[in-house]
Image (spheres, coloured by chain):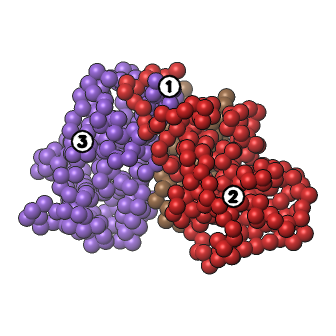
Amino acid sequence: MPPFSRGFRGRRVDVDPARVPPGQYVTRDFPVLSAGPTPRTPLDEWSLTINGAVDEPVSWAWEEFVALPSESVTVDIHCVTKWSKLDTTWTGVSVDTLLEGVETDAGYVTAWCDGGYTTNVPLEDLTGGRAWIAYEFGGEPLEPEHGGPARLLVPHLYFWKSAKWVRGLELRDDDEPGFWEAYGYHNYGNPWKEQRYSGD
Amino acid sequence: MAPARIAWRLAAVKDVLVETPRAKTLVLDVPGWPGHVAGQHVDVRLTAEDGYQAQRSYSIASAPENEKLALTVERLEDGEVSPYLTDELGPGDELELRGPIGGYFAWRSEDGGPLLLVAGGSGLVPLMAMVRHRAANSSTVDTRLLVSARSSEEVLYRDELARLAAGDGLAVHQTFTREPPAGWSGFARRVDADVLGQVGPAPSQRPRIFICGPTAFVERAADLLVGLGHDTAAIHLERFGPTGG
Amino acid sequence: MSEDPRWLDGNALGGLLQELFGAEMTGAPHTCQSCGTESPVAAHRLYLGAGTVLRCPVCDQIALVAVALRDRHMVHLTGAWRIEMPRV
């Protein structure tokens, strides 16, 4: 264990430990992490698509997407780089809503994004009220550096699964590791089991 | 450059000097310090009692000739690390660091010149190490330093620069982007092609160019210099970013 | 190419690369496998995500990905690299 830095705490808050997954530290900040440059897709060129192992791909343009039934949720988020942020508020369209009327036998989803980022999630982890395509954070339009205009929000998994700048969900019969998964991060990513890396 | 595998070391804080309202210089004793080249930096690592760690890079402000290692840190308002370094750390404390790091953004007096050094705010730190190294070697290499700052009180090492500029081939230029000092007749705007053209040297003199500061500042200055005809390969950049605080 | 002010440059990766490779690498030239541009590590764009991504300054193609896993570091390199290490 490296030596302590006397008096150093960082910008962290004390909270009920039951809300903090193992190895995490709670912060007031909202750090910006990214694998690449922030895409700047104009809204009139933006669309969200459900494709892959479906009979018919479905797509929404921006105006159609924000006109869908939406919800506001308050959730805790946990980043694999060890910071957690509690009680974050988001507004978005539930993935359940997006999948209404979509017929599929697929077990897996690859979220694909502007800039080329991908991540993989079992379909059942995106349904049952556990995931949204979020376009507001803290009551304001989601900023580009935090994934705006819209990002996937899957708070029960490490936050690299909440893909920024999402443009589509590809339903798949097979599980295809996404960007960070292919580089050694855990395929599933449950913070409560501390599944950070492959093999955990 | 023949570095060994670098290791974390515990430096002892000897002194903390106020440079400007927002910046302080940490003067450190580093046991076993292998020496450095002007322009290099160190990684600093802080560990809280519960094991939480944060790490940032800071440029070395001192010349290699100096016995003690100096780091100048600007306190960022919402920073996690910089407020600790400027407000909490004091003589007698320890600081974990590793280095020196970097061979690309470095200058030795035997590398020669002419030199053009362009600093945006706290980007002046590694360039000051070069200026100090130059002075310690009594070098007379044609050196032009351009410092961009919001106001005069934010310029690091103001008095020392005024003293050094009085001699031997070092020209110090300043430009103020928000509040020039009263009676100022020099540049009072964002660095532009005209400012850079006046500071010189001309591209035909093939200067070595070092630019340091926030990413946007560095990108802009580099583009302007290329536009003026300077060779891209002669331009060395170091960008400070908001991911470090 | 990117106007994003949030990226750093390869200078900031110097400590990690020196730790892993035992050599100063910020000056090491890399030739992009996508656009063919050769530039030093220090000139590349550095993005910090779950792991660390270094990208070509001209076309943003990934040059290097470094991840710190539980018991090891892994570094993935693309394109052509020239790394010099002093002989001891």
Q: Amino acid at mark 2?
A: Trp
Which hue is chain B drawn in?
A: purple
Subunit under mark 3: B
Q: How far across and down, in percent of the image, does residue B127 sit? A: 30, 48
Residue under the image location 34 percent in, 47 percent down: B77
B71 vs A140, nearest the viewer: A140
Q: Output the letter for the chain in red.
A: A
Residue B50: image tag: 1
**Which element is circle 3 on?**
helix
Residue under the image location 69 percent in, 70 percent down: A68
In which quarter of the view is residue A90 placed?
bottom right
Circle nearer the N terminus (1, 3): 1
Q: How far across and down, in percent of the image, does residue B205 sit? A: 31, 63
Residue A92: image tag: none
Q: Is residue A194 left or right of residue B167?
A: right
Q: What residue does disc 2 label?
A: A132
Q: How far across and down, in percent of the image, does residue A150 sit? A: 62, 64
Which hue is chain C drawn in?
A: brown
Subunit under mark 2: A
Image quarter of the N terminus of chain B: top left
Q: Is residue B26 above or below residue A111?
A: above
Subunit under mark 1: B
Q: What residue does disc 3 label?
A: B132
B104 vs B46, nearest the viewer: B46
In three-dimensional space, the C-alpha distance between marks 2 and 3, rounded to whole angstroms, equals 56 Å
Image quarter of the C terminus of chain B: top left
